Image (cartoon, rainbow, N blue to C red):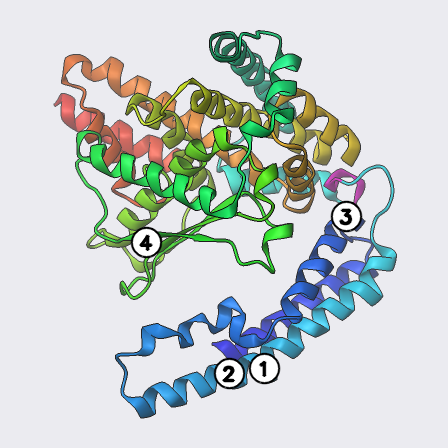
Amino acid sequence: RWNAFADYIDDYISNLRTGLETGRVAARASVNRTIVQLGALLERPVEEWPIYAPAGTRLDAWPEGTRHDFRAGIREAASERIQPAYARLRDFLRDELYPHSRTGAAVGLSSLPGGSACYEAMIRNFTTLELTPAEIHAQGLAELEKVHDELRTLGQEVLGASDLKEIQQRLRSDPEMFFRWPGEIVQMAEEAYARAALVMPDWFGTTPRTEMVIRPIPLYEAPQSQLAYYREPAPDGSRPGTYYVNTYRPEIRPRYQADVLSFHEAIPGHHLQTAIAQEIEGLPEFRKHLGSVAFVEGWALYAEHLADEMGLYVDGLSRIGLASYDAWRASRLVVDTGIHAFGWTRQEAIEFVRENTLLAEVNIENEVDRYITSPAQALTYKLGQLEILRLRSKAEARLGEAFSIAEFHDRVLENGALSLPALSDAIDNWLAETAS
């Protein structure tokens, strides 16, 4: 598998070259970010690469000869096959693709041949819903209006300010709102995880057996990476689930958003959902590990607000962090469609996010470049959450006093990451069975 990964990279280069020949190339900012990240990776010895990690301490229980041969095989594959393949990709991007990457104002799919139809197909693929870009755009604006009202209320209670721009200015400029050193970020994530673990049985009938650990994002990756991400556990239990937090330049990372980020990535968010899916007996293997992005990200966004019901946010400032994340996800519906369907420029997208969310400046550009590079993926969070909330409201109305929040959550999670229409059918079937 390690050796074959080099062939995958070469196939990827071939596909990019075909795109170059047919006028379908990425925006320059996206290409440049990838070149920088690959360069940082290639400067490090292969023994420090994530792909080399399986050769680490987890092999200590193996017989000496087997352990030696396995490590030697990984080292050879990484240094003789994978490292040169990554270098070829970096060189292709730098020498061939970058000079022809798009530098015009329009950076979205609609500016490419067949791009509008492609974007509509990607919406269906990612969200599993039949929605037009215009419908999603309008829904995003409506959701933003609601969360802005919530931010004004919280701002008055916590900061003594109800004007959105004043709230933004306070949160973005006050050094006390940001971390001072990397260890604080990891510590706050661990504390949020511990609080959530204590109350899980009150809200879920089924909780995962698989453990989770919290780690900093590797240094070579961190400057170009997102705020955090989750890596699923190994199916055989040899590797726990891992919540990676970005500790690079802690002084630019808001403290008040740390809790909501933890609840999204760890429990009751990604780790809970992913680990439960892997542990479902009788579920086909592919459904334990693959599934609808709209379900996965929709659940994690639902979990952010569920954590508020669970009493996990420690103060009003952390609840501002919750509302700020909601504004961020609602803005994605507007910005993603703006970029890829309505011809927005990169700068227009940046300005919209700056004016309508509480994201720190460094994260705004990272996020907009992500939307440019991965069309429609960012739509899944809010659309998935809204569908889960719709199904919960339906179950509460249908079952009345018989409604159990723990049972509802178990029914949502018991089939793995379904498409949203399939999830709706599953909940309808459960409600029909309960009624009968």
Q: Secondary structure at mark 3?
A: helix
Amino acid carrying label 2: it is: Arg
Q: What x and y, as percent, mark residue 90?
A: 73, 67
Q: Is the residue under label 1 in contact with that under label 2 (CB below 8 Å)? A: yes
Disc 2 to disc 3, how far (Cα)?
33 Å
Residue matched to label 4? 288
Residue 75 is labelled as 2
Residue depicted at 40% across the width and 43% down the height: 187
Circle nearer the N terminus (4, 3): 3
Residue matched to label 3? 29
Is 245 displayed left or right of 120 in the figure?
left
Residue matched to label 1? 79
Say if residue 162 shows up in the picture: yes
Amino acid carrying label 4: it is: Lys
Circle nearer the N terminus (1, 3): 3
Circle nearer the N terminus (4, 1): 1
Quadrant of the image containing the C terminus: top left
Please tell me how crowded label 4 is: few (under 14), some (14-19), or many (20+) other residues with Cα within 10 Å.
many
